[in-house]
Amino acid sequence: MEIDLLYFKKIIKGMPNTKDILKRKIVLNNFEPLKDSSGKDRKLLRLIFISGALSVLFLAIIIFTLPYTDLSLSSLFVFSSIVSLVIFLFVLLFRYFSILVMAYLYITRYTVQQKNTYTPFVSIIVPVYNEGKVLTESIKSLLKLNYSNYEIIIVNDGSTDNTKQVAQSLVGLQDGLNSKVRISLVNKANGGKSRALNAGIQVSKGDFVLCMDGDSQLSPDTLKYGVSHFIDPAIGAVAGNVKVLNRKKFLTDLQSLEYLEGLNMPRSAQSFLKLVNIIPGPIGIFRKKAIQDAGWYASDTFAEDADLTLKILAAGWKIYYEPMAISWTEAPDKLNQLLKQRYRWTRGIIQSIRKHKKHLMNPTINFNNSLVLWSMFYESLIWPIMNIFANGYFIIVALFFGMSNLLVFWWAGLALLDLMTSLYCIAVEKEEVRLIPYAIVYRLFFILLIDITKFMATIEEFLGMQMTWGKLERIGTAKA
């Protein structure tokens, strides 16, 4: 892979404001795995055949054994539904309280543990594709980091807007908060985010790299707190804390609550075991050796961050979560954009799980990775189906059997759990109290809609239907 590298070389003596900018072409290694498409259609047909045969077999068993029981078809439906819902409720409560307890234990340990001052050189990789509206604010936030030992590498992945021109205007030795910061630019043909990140990592000078999105804005203490964990040689990566930047809209406020309750709190719980399952794209700090051990980023899934995380865990590294390493990012403010984003996330995660299925089936290879994969399998495939079924069941009962009070109790119980959880999350992160009332509609409407999208994405993924990456239209939100 050949790229153009635009970088700063020196300041001419006696002329501190003069920059010497050089441009050169370099050839990088291509770490992309070769894709083997042979037999894909055959595997799909075999999967469809086996699934259909098992469904027919189980249906036949029910039909032929039902006359020998005291149950009618309708009573069997009611009985099985009640059993399923009771199991669902127990799983729901166990999931809530186990995550809450481990998250609380992690935050307690995090609060009392002594912070060290480990400050190695860090390379910040900023992959951009048509991010001209937001790139300047992102780089400004990086120049305000409370850290003095880092560089910034912008990787322009074949943008078609003014991203290249904006990036070129930022190249050079810029004034940081504590020191001068070297900003370089890599121009390459469009090849996707994973290839852009690999290109940036290969030209980086640091043993530690921070990978982020082109629209992300980092909090000043991100590097100070995030990098400190690498004093432990077992830590291969640190996941950051993602927050929604463009708030004050109904949909983006709901996502703000979701990031707190549905993403950051589970990461806190996972960090108690140092087994975070997904390092978020907007903020992830890596030991470069861990990326090399994992085989670099790959573009054979639509969730390169989840794929790399699983590969790092499989290589034996630990992954930590740092709540003070905050990345502010734009969230979709239109429903169709939100559903497209979650559709891609779901299919990408399923692709990552399938890619690492040997760890799913054989825990003796790497038990920690198997534990992480099974939790991802449950959250991505089983939980959405259970949630859709439970809500659909209560709606049917309320409408056709005159038991609408059950629907009210169901909604009230879920809302109470979410109110309790959101109160905890907002208190821990000192977030906006005004987000708490959104918990009333969060579970029954917002999460149900997301789970329906996940369910449809799961079906299409297993049917092998084609999809494209998709690109969120940036609105150029002001600085965080």
Image (cartoon, rainbow, N blue to C red):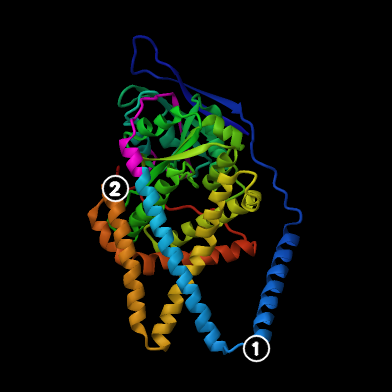
Q: Residues within 10 Å of mark 1 (few under 14, many from 20)?
A: few
Residue hosting label 2: 428
Q: Is residue 20 above or below residue 338?
A: above
Q: Which mark is residue 193?
A: none
Along the viewing direction, whichever of 311 and 215 lies nearer the viewer: 311
Residue 205 shown in magenta:
no
When asked about the image quadrant of residue 457, the answer is: bottom right
| 119 drawn magenta | yes
Q: In this figure, which residue is indicated by the disc labeled 1?
A: 68
Task: Describe the element under mark 1 as helix, strand or loop.
Answer: helix
Quick check: can you spot residue 329? no
Q: Which residues are magenta?
A: 107-135
Q: Is residue 161 above or below residue 78?
A: above
Is tag 1's residue or tag 2's residue first in the polypeptide sequence? Answer: 1
- Name the kind of residue labelled 1 in the image: Tyr
Q: State which mark lies toward you, 1 or 2.
A: 1
State which quadrant residue 391 falls in: bottom left
Q: Quadrant of the C terminus?
A: top left
Query: Does dot 2 land on a helix, a strand or a loop?
Result: helix
